[in-house]
Amino acid sequence: MQLSDQRQIKAAPAVVWAAILDPEVLKACVPGCESMTGSPADGFEAVVVQKVGPVKARFTGLVHLSDIVEGKSLTISGEGKGGPAGFAKGGAKVTFTPEGDGTLLAYEVEANVGGKLAQLGSRLIDGFAKKMADDFFERFQQTIEGPAEPEPEPEGDAPEGEAKKGWLKRIIG
């Protein structure tokens, strides 16, 4: 299964780059992630619980960052074993391009499964893999930018000029 997409993130490329290397950010962005430890240099160990169709499994695996071009691109690759459910492996080539006052994040994802998961059929697996990738990058964008701006309150209940930012953007930006 392969897919590609892009997102416009309202943060400087340096902020987006720092976020993609942070294990706490990655843990918050991976759906079903119970734990993530490690470093960009040594790789990360992760435990993720997912349900794909009728199969629910706890995957333990490794995530590695490679092909790193500081501030511009990297490849995230991982492999997880889910016991009797089978295995999942895949990766994403991610590029960061300054665009206006933000960053255009583009990604190409490839995923493969085996074991009981592979028996579910390619349509179900492809749909699940697309949803996982979309959820990851949506959460990643929300972590950096913060929640979407709510509709303005009548009578100006919120202080003028106070912009909501993601917690990472407040720390790094």
Image (cartoon, grey):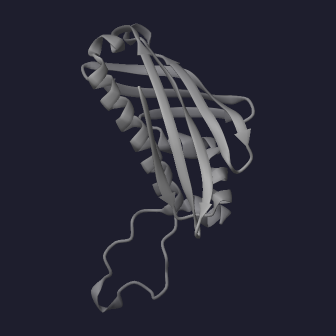
Which residue is at a point 75% across and 34% down the rendered structure image?
41
**Residue 173 at what x, y percent from top left?**
65, 66
**Across the whole image, how many numbered discs are drawn on residues?**
0
Say if residue 129 shows up in the picture.
Answer: yes
Which residue is at a point 47% across and 62% down the rendered structure image?
146
Residue sitting nearer the eye, 49 or 142: 142
Q: Is residue 79 left or right of residue 37?
A: left
**Residue 106 at what x, y percent from top left?**
53, 47
Say if residue 31 shows up in the picture.
Answer: no
Q: In this view, does 155 lie to the left or right of 169?
A: left
Which residue is at a point 66% across and 44% down the rendered structure image?
73
Location of the N terminus (image quadrant): top left
Residue sitting nearer the eye, 9 or 171: 9
Q: In this view, does 167 lie to the left or right of 126?
A: right
Residue at far bottom of view: 155
**Residue 60 at what x, y percent from top left?**
52, 20
Residue at far left of view: 54
Q: Tell me: residue 156, above or below residue 164.
A: below
Q: Tell me: residue 164, above or below residue 17.
A: below
Which residue is at a point 35% across and 13% down the rendered structure image?
118
**Residue 12 at what x, y percent from top left?**
63, 63
Q: Tell me: residue 136, above or below residue 159.
A: above
Q: In which quarter of the image is residue 37?
A: top right
Residue sitting nearer the eye, 5 or 168: 5
